[in-house]
Image (spheres, grey):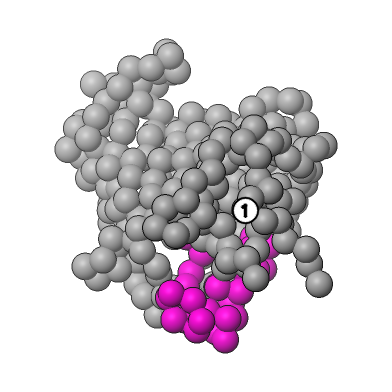
Amino acid sequence: MTAYTSFTELKIGQIFPDPAARFDVTEASVDAYLGATEDSAEIYRKKDGPRPAPPTLAAVYMLDALSHLRNPPGGIHTKQSFVFHQPAYVGDTLSTQARILETYVKKGRNYVVMEIVTHNQKNALVTTGVITRIWGKEA
Amino acid sequence: MQHGVQIGDVLPESRHKVTQDQIDRYAEASGDRNPLHIDPEFAKETMFGRTIAHGLLSLAFLSQAMTAWDWKGWAFGGGLDIAFLGPVYPGDEVAVRGKVTALEIGENGVIAVCEVACTVEDRTVIAGTVRRRLETA
């Protein structure tokens, strides 16, 4: 049985995961994302030269990093911001870390605000963002 | 105006029919297997009463609209700031709309700011702003 993190255990300023979560941008991961989102844009299927991933692939590598916090099931997103500094390309290895900015309770629901920062293998900034989630219901 | 974008310009509207099959595929592709999205029995006991699509799936529709408008300005220095206001259920059709409301000069050049909304019939499910870089400084 998976041990979930309690809302009361979350600490402002907490940085995770440490070391940063690594995500390999592969042909397969981009194809799966394009297929699931039914995105037909030619630019993401480029064969002559570096193949960019859709900027919102950030949703995938961000959640991969956030999964280290072991959010109980049933949580949902309420807000999201992203800045796309430059594209991620197939072949890149991305490193993502998150930091807890704020926690609060509103109308009986537990909210967590987290900042995420993603760099590529050249240590260049790829994506930054802030996510607000309602923490999943704890048993 | 070199970039040809003006306040009041409207993004081409796009529509996306969401199915449970697509939600399941998004769960696999993204690794987000939250049972709220893919387990009808679990979802039945939540405030939604049934499964809902990932908010980030609808966000991908918004990104597709921006890519179609200008991929470079979106992928190199673009961004978004949105709120998820309501659920998208299997069978819903999501409409994506946007309008340029400001042109800003920042340290990285000229940015077009667009108010955007994703709606399902008369319900707004996502609202906020997106930013597209028009020129480098």
Query: Is residue A106 or residue A34 the one in the foreground?
Result: A106
Q: Residue furthest bottom?
A: B41
Q: Secondary structure at mark 1?
A: helix
Is residue B98 visible to the viewer in this orientation of the structure? yes
State yes or no: residue B45 in magenta: yes
In this rendering, the answer to whether A90 lies above or below A108 is above
Residue A88, image x, y percentages: 65, 39
Q: Is residue A26 left or right of residue B3?
A: right
Q: Which image quadrant: the C terminus of chain B?
A: top left
Question: Which segment did they paint magenta?
Answer: B28-57
Q: Position of residue B37 (x, y in %)?
A: 55, 73
At label 1, the amino acid type is Phe
Chain of the residue under label 1? A
Q: Residue at x 35, y 21 (%)?
A: B110
**Could you say which quadrant of the image residue B91 lies in?**
bottom left
B3 sits left or right of A105 in the view: left
Residue at x 51%, y 51% (from the top left corner): A111
> Disc 1 marks which residue?
A7
Pick the front one: A2 or B26? A2
Residue B40 placement (x, y as % from top left): 55, 84
Q: Residue at x 29, y 39 (%)?
A: B114
- Asked if residue A97 lies in the magenta stretch, the reply is no
**The quarter of the displayed image where residue B7 is located:** top left
B113 displayed left or right of B10: right
